[in-house]
C-alpha cells in the first residue's frame, strides 16, 4: 500500500521516488507475479491457485503525486495497480486528482476502488452515518465513472464489524484495512491486510521481506470486531498448521509502544492476554513464525 510519491513534506505517508523505483525493480524480477488485485481476490474466493510471491499493489487517497510520479512508472513497467478514491477530496482539494484524470487512469488500466466519501474516522459511526458514506460515494462513482467499485479500503484502516455487513449488502466483494500481513484462504474478506510502504518502512530490505512472506493460516480469531468494546481485548485464534505454534511469537503495539502480554499455547488454540489496557487510537497485533526458508505473518488492527 502506498499513498504519496515524492512528497517529502509528508514522510509518514510518502515514498521517495528512488525508494519506489527500487521497489518496482524488485517486483519486476521473475520470482514475483504482480497481478491485478481483483484477479488475486477472485482466485482466492474461488479456491484457485496463485503463483508463489503473488503481489497486489494498491494506492490510497488519489493524491496528485500518483498521477505525476506513481502511475507513469507503474505503467512503463506494465504493473497493475488499484487506486482507492475518497470522493469528497476529488471535489474539494487541489492536491488531489480530478475526475477527468481519474477517468483517464481508468481508461489506461488502473482499477478504481472506494475509500469512502469523507475519509473520516468511521469506526464509531452509527449505521445511518455508514450508509451515508457508501450511498454518497456510490452515487458519485456511478455519475463520474459509470460504475460502482467492487473493492473498498477503510480510511486509516479503522472499522467496526457492523460495517462488514453493510459492505456485503451493497455488493462490495472485499475490503482492506491498513494492518500488515499476507492474504490467504483464511483471511476475513472484509478486513484484508496490506503492507504499508512509506519513507520509514520502505527500505528495500523490508520490501523484499514483505514480498516473500506467506500467510499464517489463522482462523476463528477473536475478537471478531476490530472496534474495541472490552479493554484490554481478549485475543485468541487457531492455526491451520498447528506445528507452527511452537515457535510463534506475537507483538502488540499502541501509541505508548509495546504492550506487555502473556502467550498461552494449547493444542489447538493460541491465547494472548494483555497486561494492561490499550490506549485510544490504533493498536496493532503482529504474529510471525519462521517456517522452513520463509516467514509467515498475520496482522490485525484494533481501534479504541
Image (cartoon, helix red, strand yellow):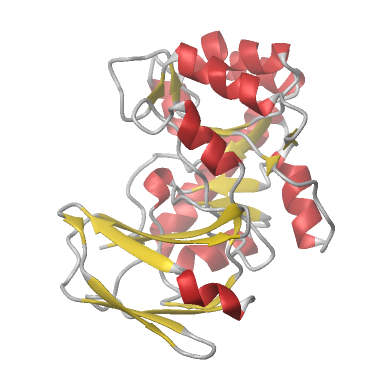
Res 227 → quadrant: bottom left
Q: Residue at x 54, y 42 (%)?
A: 210
- Relative to 273, say whether 6 is above or below: above
Q: Nearer the viewer, residue 148 or 212?
A: 212
Residue 9 % position (x, y): 28, 16
Res 108 → quadrant: top right
Q: Residue at x 17, y 61 (%)?
A: 279
Q: Residue at x 67, y 39 (%)?
A: 55
Q: Nearer the viewer, residue 78 or 22?
A: 22
Is residue 222 toward the left or the right of residue 46 in the image? Answer: left
Residue 91 % position (x, y): 45, 23
- Relative to 12, say whether 293 is above or below: below
Is residue 158 toward the left or the right of residue 102 in the image? Answer: left
- Relative to 278, say whether 213 is above or below: above
Q: Is residue 98 visible?
A: no
Residue 179 % position (x, y): 44, 51
Q: Is residue 93 visible?
A: yes
Give the number of marks. 0
Residue 215 % position (x, y): 61, 59
- Relative to 73, say whether 179 is above or below: below
| Residue located farthest toward the bottom when viewing the structure as drawn | 267
Is residue 140 toward the left or the right of residue 15 in the image? Answer: right
Q: Residue at x 83, y 55 (%)?
A: 49
Where, quadrant-wise, is the C terminus in this rendering?
bottom left
Amino acid at each position: 500500500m502506498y499513498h504519496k510519491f515524492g512528497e517529502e513534506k509528508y514522510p509518514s505517508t510518502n515514498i521517495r521516488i528512488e525508494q519506489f523505483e527500487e521497489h518496482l525493480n524488485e517486483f519486476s524480477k521473475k520470482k514475483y507475479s504482480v497481478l491485478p488485485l481483483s484477479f488475486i481476490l477472485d482466485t482466492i474466493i474461488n479456491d484457485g491457485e496463485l503463483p508463489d510471491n503473488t503481489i497486489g499493489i494498491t494506492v490510497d487517497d488519489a493524491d496528485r503525486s500518483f498521477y505525476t510520479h506513481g502511475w507513469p512508472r507503474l505503467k512503463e513497467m506494465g504493473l497493475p495497480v488499484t487506486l482507492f478514491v475518497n470522493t469528497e477530496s476529488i471535489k474539494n482539494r487541489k492536491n488531489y486528482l480530478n475526475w477527468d484524470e481519474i477517468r483517464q487512469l481508468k481508461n489506461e488500466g488502473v482499477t478504481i476502488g472506494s475509500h469512502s466519501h469523507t475519509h473520516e474516522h468511521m469506526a464509531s459511526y452509527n449505521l445511518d452515518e455508514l450508509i451515508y458514506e457508501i450511498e454518497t460515494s456510490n452515487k458519485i462513482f456511478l455519475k463520474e465513472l459509470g460504475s460502482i467499485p467492487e473493492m473498498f479500503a477503510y480510511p486509516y484502516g479503522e472499522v467496526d464489524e457492523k460495517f462488514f455487513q453493510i459492505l456485503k449488502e451493497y455488493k462490495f466483494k472485499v475490503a482492506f484495512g491498513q494492518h500488515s500481513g499476507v492474504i490467504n484462504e483464511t483471511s476475513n474478506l472484509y478486513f484484508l491486510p496490506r503492507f504499508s510502504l512509506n519513507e520509514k518502512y520502505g527500505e528495500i530490505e523490508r520490501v523484499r521481506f514483505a514480498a516473500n512472506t506467506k500467510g499464517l493460516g489463522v482462523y476463528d480469531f477473536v475478537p471478531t470486531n476490530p472496534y474495541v468494546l472490552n479493554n484490554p481485548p481478549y485475543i485468541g485464534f487457531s492455526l491451520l498448521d498447528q506445528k507452527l505454534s511452537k515457535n510463534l511469537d506475537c507483538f502488540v503495539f499502541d501509541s505508548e509502544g509495546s504492550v506487555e502480554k502473556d502467550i498461552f499455547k494449547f493444542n489447538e488454540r493460541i491465547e494472548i492476554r494483555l497486561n494492561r489496557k490499550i490506549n485510544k487510537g490504533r493498536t496493532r497485533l503482529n504474529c510471525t513464525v519462521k517456517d522452513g526458508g520463509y516467514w509467515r505473518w498475520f496482522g490485525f488492527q484494533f481501534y479504541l
